[in-house]
Amino acid sequence: MRTSTESSLVPYVTLREGEEGAPANLLITPKRPGNRLQLRYADEERDDRDIRGVLWARCSQTPRDERGMPTGMPRWKLMHPSRQRETMQELRCQVCVKRARTPLGFIFLAGPNDYEPDATSIITGQPPVCAKHARAAARLCPHLDGRPMVFITRSAPLYGVHGTLYGYGEDGVQVVAAPDHPLPYGHPNLPTLLASQLVRRLNSFRLVDLEELLEELTAATQPLPGGPDDARPWPSGR
């Protein structure tokens, strides 16, 4: 059951009613050196590309409230591409958009059946959560079903992007493929891909359940018996 606070809480990354994809004005043109074909907007701006030069889907944004949060009814199963990119790139909490690092490291949540329990490498498009909003995120997101897989990691390097591939067809520039997996940065198809999700890879992590996470976060914020100079060891794991 959601608390009254959670009932009024909508994650920053959640798409809102009224936020829609911008009209397509895509071109494919040669880019030097090599004259390799590249997807671009006819009126492209600097923020249309990410830090690796990949073109991103445009989507309108509703007005912000006094806290700087988006307004409008949530579309719970969808994430806004720009806000997902922002929180994933800067490792900010997907709920409150504050820095997501915790005393344990970074916390990433996944659906209860998204990965095998013995997986040694995880690729995720879900931005991290901060210590304060881990429980709320688990209850608010329908995909997490209140019982998420919880991955704790010290490092989550950028991997690539989810998106849609474009090419030439009878109607000019059009969708030619929608890969069901993310493309890593450096992939030869990225120049003609329109990205919608930024993806990170987790190679070294611990897998715990939600209650274990909350207990560890509570313990990590308690004063250490020996004083502030005593270091709390990083628990062994993957």
Image (cartoon, rainbow, N blue to C red):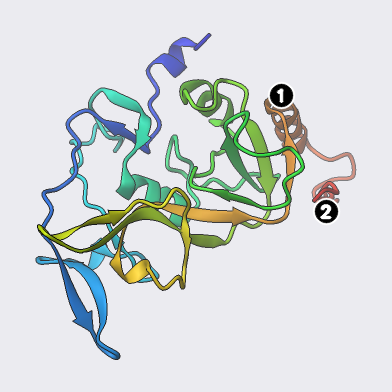
187 relative to 71, above or below: below
Say which of 97 and 38 sits in front: 38
Q: Quadrant of residue 148?
A: top right
Residue 125: % across, % down: 48, 47
- The furthest residue to the front: 170
SS assignment at label 1 = helix
Question: Which amino acid type is marked by label 2?
Answer: Asp
Q: Is residue 200 left or right of residue 36?
A: right
Task: Residue at 51%, 28% (x, y): give it.
Answer: 137
**Circle 2 residues within 10 Å: few <14, some 14–19, many ≥20:** few
**Circle 1 residues within 10 Å: few <14, some 14–19, many ≥20:** few
Say which of 4 and 28 sits in front: 28
Say which of 189 and 75 sits in front: 189
Residue at mark 1: 211
Task: Residue at 71%, 44% (x, y): give it.
Answer: 104
Residue at mark 2: 229
Question: Which amino acid type is marked by label 1?
Answer: Glu
Q: Is residue 185 left or right of residue 71?
A: right
Residue 85: % across, % down: 38, 52
Q: Earlier in the sequence, mark 2 or mark 1?
A: 1
Residue 72: % across, % down: 22, 26
Q: Nearer the viewer, mark 2 or mark 1?
A: 1
**CA–CA distance between discs 2 and 1?**
28 Å
Task: Residue at 53%, 30% (x, y): give it.
Answer: 133
- The furthest residue to the bottom: 33
SS assignment at label 2 = loop
Mark identifier at residue 151? none
Residue 115: % across, % down: 64, 39
